[in-house]
Amino acid sequence: MLSEFSRTTRRGFLTASATAGAIGLAPYASAHAFDVTNELAEGAAGGDPAAIRPFRFAASDAALADLKRRVEMTRWPEPETVADDTQGVQLATIQALARHWSGDYDWRRCEARLNALPNFITEIDGLDIHFLHVRSRHENAAPLIVTHGWPGSILEQLKIIGPLTDPTAHGGDAADAFHLVIPSLPGHGFSAKPTAVGWGPDRTAHAWAVLMNRLGYQRYFAQGGDWGSMVTDLLAVQSPTAVIAILNNMPAALQPDISRLVQTGGAAPPGLAPDEQRAFDELIDFFAKHVAYAIEMTNRPQTLYGVSDSPVALAAWMIDHDKKSYELIARAFAGNPGGISRDDVLDNATLYWLTNTGISSARLYWENKRGFFDVKGVDVPSAISVFPDELYECPRSWAERAYPKLIHYNRLPVGGHFAAWEQPALLTEEIRTAFRPLRNA
C-alpha cells in the first residue's frame, strides 16, 4: 500500500461527483446470470478473450527444489548492532524463517488448498485476471468482491471463505451468506503482469466492475484492506449504482490539511479530540519511520532485482511492512504465534516466489497517483472496521467526513493490518453486521 509520499506532483484528488444508487438489494444479478462452472467449456471453445476459463496451478518439483537450494545457499550478513528491530528485519527472525522454509515447510499443502477452490482466469482490458469465485449453497446469497493488498495475496482471504459462503456450517445464519469473488491484483499472484504502464488502482477498480458484470452480478457489496481498500473505494466511486455498500478496514479518511501535516512531520492542528490526536501521532510515526519499502517501490521498483533472485531477500522485504505486523510475524518464528502462523507467512512468500511477482507487484506503487489515505469521494453506504494494530486507528469523526453515508463504525479489540488473515472471525462478523440491514431492506 501507500504511495502518497515522495510523489506530491503526481497526486490527484478525485472530486466527490459520483451519486449513490438506490440502497435496495434486488436484483443482485441480471437475467443472464449463470452458474460459471457450466459456462466454461462453451466460452473457451469459442476463443472469446472474455471467456471465463478454469485455472489450476501446480509448481514443478524442479521449481520447489530450486527454491530450497536458494534458501539454503543464502549468504548471511552479520547481526544487527542493536537489540531491537530498529535496523530492520532481525537476523534471528529471518534465519528462523529460512530454516522452516528449507526444512518442514510444505508448499503442496497450500497448493492443494488453493486448487480445491474454484479458480478462474478471464481477460479484461487486454490483461488476464485471476480470481476465485466461490458460490454459496444458500438461497439469496449476496455477491461480495473482496480485494487483497501488498504484500498480501488471495491467500489472505482463505480463512473467511467458509464462514461467508456457508455461514450455517460456521455458527452463522443462512441469511448472511455471500457469493465470493476474490481477484488477484494485476501483477500479483496468478494474474498477468502488465507489460505497459497504466495499471494503477483506478484501472483495477474498473476491471473489477467489468468482472462482476461478466459474472452476472448487477449489484454487489465490496470489501478491502491495504491496496484493496483503495480499489474498493474507487470501485464505489466509479460504479455507485452497482456497489450497494463497502466495508473498509483501512479507510482513506485524511482531509488535505491532516494529510499534508502527517507526511511532512508538522505539528498537530489545535483542537483535536483524543482519538484524533492518537491517529495523528500514529501517522506521524508511520511516515517518519516505517515507509522505506513504499518509498522505494513508489520511485524505483525495478531496482529490486534481489527479490527476484533470492527467496530470503523477497521474504525479508515482504515481512518488513509495518511495525505491528512485523512484530506479529517475528513472534511466530520465535515459537509464539498469534493470528498469523509460520506457514501463513511462507505460503504467501512462496506464492510470490513461484510466480516471480516481487517486482511486478511493486510497480502498483509506481503506478498510483493518489494519496493513499486521502479522501476519495465515496458516496455509497460505507462501513469502517478499526483494528487497533492497523497503521492508524481512524477516528469516527474522520470516517464520518470521508464517508458521508457511514452505516457502520466499530473499533475491534484485537487485530492489525492483515485483518482477514489474522482475525478472520472478527472480520467475518463485521461484514455480516455491516451489510445485513441493506440486504434485508
Image (tube, helix red, strand yellow):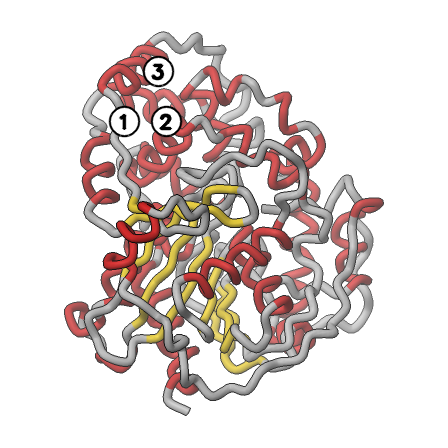
Query: Is residue 274 depicted above or below 343 in this figure?
Result: below
Q: Secondary structure at mark 2?
A: helix
Task: Identify which residue, 377 or 418, lies in the foreground.
Answer: 377
Taking the image as shown, residue 321 lies to the left or right of residue 34, namely right
Q: Nearer the viewer, mark 3 or mark 1?
A: 1
Q: Position of residue 136 (x, y in %)?
A: 24, 68
Gap between marks 3 and 2, in whole Å? 13 Å
User: Disc 2 marks which residue?
Assistant: 354
| Quadrant of the rendered image containing residue 377 | bottom right
How far is mark 2 from mark 1, CA to CA?
Answer: 7 Å
- At x 27%, y 26%, the residue is 59
Towards the viewer: 349 or 190: 190
The disc, 3 or 1, on the residue closer to the chain's N-terminal end is 1
* Nearer-N-terminus badge (3/2): 3
Which residue position is annotated with label 1? 59
Residue bearing the label numbered 3: 71
Which residue does the image show at 63% across and 66% down from the upper left? 238
For residue 426, above or below residue 231: below
What is the secondary structure assignment of the residue under circle 3? helix
- Whether residue 326 is visible, yes or no, is no
Q: Amino acid at mark 1?
A: Ala
Q: Is residue 359 visible?
A: yes
Badge 2: how crowded within 10 Å, few (<14), some, or many (20+)? Answer: some
